[in-house]
Image (cartoon, rainbow, N blue to C red):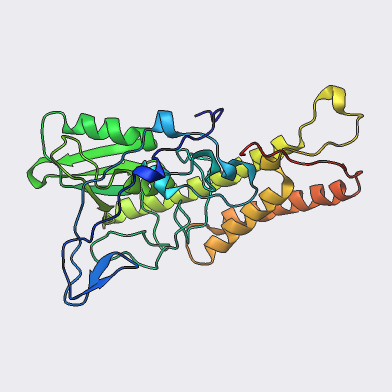
Amino acid sequence: MSLDKPARVQVDPETIPQEDAPPQTGTVFNIWYNKWSGGGNQFQLVKAKYKLNVEKDSGYTKANKTDGLKFFCLFFAKGMCTKGKKCEYLHRIPNEFDFLPQTVDCFGREKFSEYKDDMSGIGSFNHVNKTLYIGGLIIKDNTHDLLNKNFRKLGKIVKINVINNKNCGFITFKDEINAQFAKEAMIGQSLYENDILNIKWANEDPNPAAIKQKKRQHEEETFQIVENLLTKFDQSKKIKPNQQQEPEIEEPKEFETPVVEKEIKQIEASNSKSTILNEKSLNYLSLLGKVNQTSTQKKETAPLVSGYESSDDDE
């Protein structure tokens, strides 16, 4: 999706009502977390007041002008960001070129080593999970079609499975980052106005064949990530034929060499807490790092460009 327009303000901050206290499930009410504690901690699913409109709400923000690691706006996913183009997080749908360490989700929240008992929450950094459990479904003839219509806007879907006699379903995305985004964007939403979707992480398939297939798929995706980085690196070095004899110009920020270096380090750092990268993948990254280092050394001998100042049109 082209980000040729600024992200719009999804909700006027003046119109957001003060959150009422949730139904009492404990003995003490914590005003900081807006929840009850002591004597119980029952989860109360509430119907969402806002919903993301991908076509209208997507646009560039302050995050598009920064280098390094970029996270997505959680409030944008829920359709309720009050900052618009001034937001410091991305206002778009994740894609295959977005890479984040396995220790955090697409919103920058730290994962835990294992899932919660009820499979809710942010997720586990020890497991790559692309499948969401969709509870609270009202099964009708068009339920499958409505699930596809609502979720495909949030990422490429591999499979949708509706369990009619259980009033639930499962949706598998091509990439985990899209599953993370969709989980937050669609929890509390409805398909028929009188239902509320309860979305959690799906349990892993214990079948040995499925585990083997998943491992092989992880390795293939790792190579794809590295290839994307190589493509990104090569694009940053391309110069038009009529500019070959001219002094080196500053490269676009999005493809600067330091950014590639950071992404390499992020992949290597995530591997220390995950088993996604195999030895071949690490060797591939090492080769990319050497190429990148050689290019950096050459760049240091080139004349520096002075007087450059990035513009800021956010005001």
Residue most toward the left?
165
Task: Say which quarter of the image contains residue 163.
Answer: top left
Give the x, y percent position of residue 101: 52, 57
Give the x, y percent position of residue 25: 16, 68
Residue most toward the front?
14
The residue depicted at 57 percent of the width and 59 percent of the height is 279
> Where is the C terminus found, in terms of image quarters?
top right
Position of 92 compared to 124: left or right?
A: right
Position of 104 compared to 18: left or right?
A: right
The residue depicted at 63 percent of the width and 42 percent of the height is 65
The residue depicted at 37 percent of the width and 33 percent of the height is 53
Q: Looking at the picture, tell me which residue is in the foreground, 90 or 11.
A: 11
Task: Say which quarter of the image contains residue 122.
Answer: bottom left
Q: How many marks?
A: 0
The residue depicted at 39 percent of the width and 68 percent of the height is 113
Q: Is residue 115 above or below residue 99?
A: below
Task: Say which quarter of the image contains residue 196.
Answer: top left
Q: Is residue 287 visible?
A: no
Q: Is residue 239 above or below residue 277?
A: above
Position of 137 compared to 96: left or right?
A: left
Q: Is residue 280 above or below residue 24?
A: above
Give the x, y percent position of residue 77: 39, 43
Give the x, y percent position of residue 284: 63, 51
Q: Is residue 90 visible?
A: yes
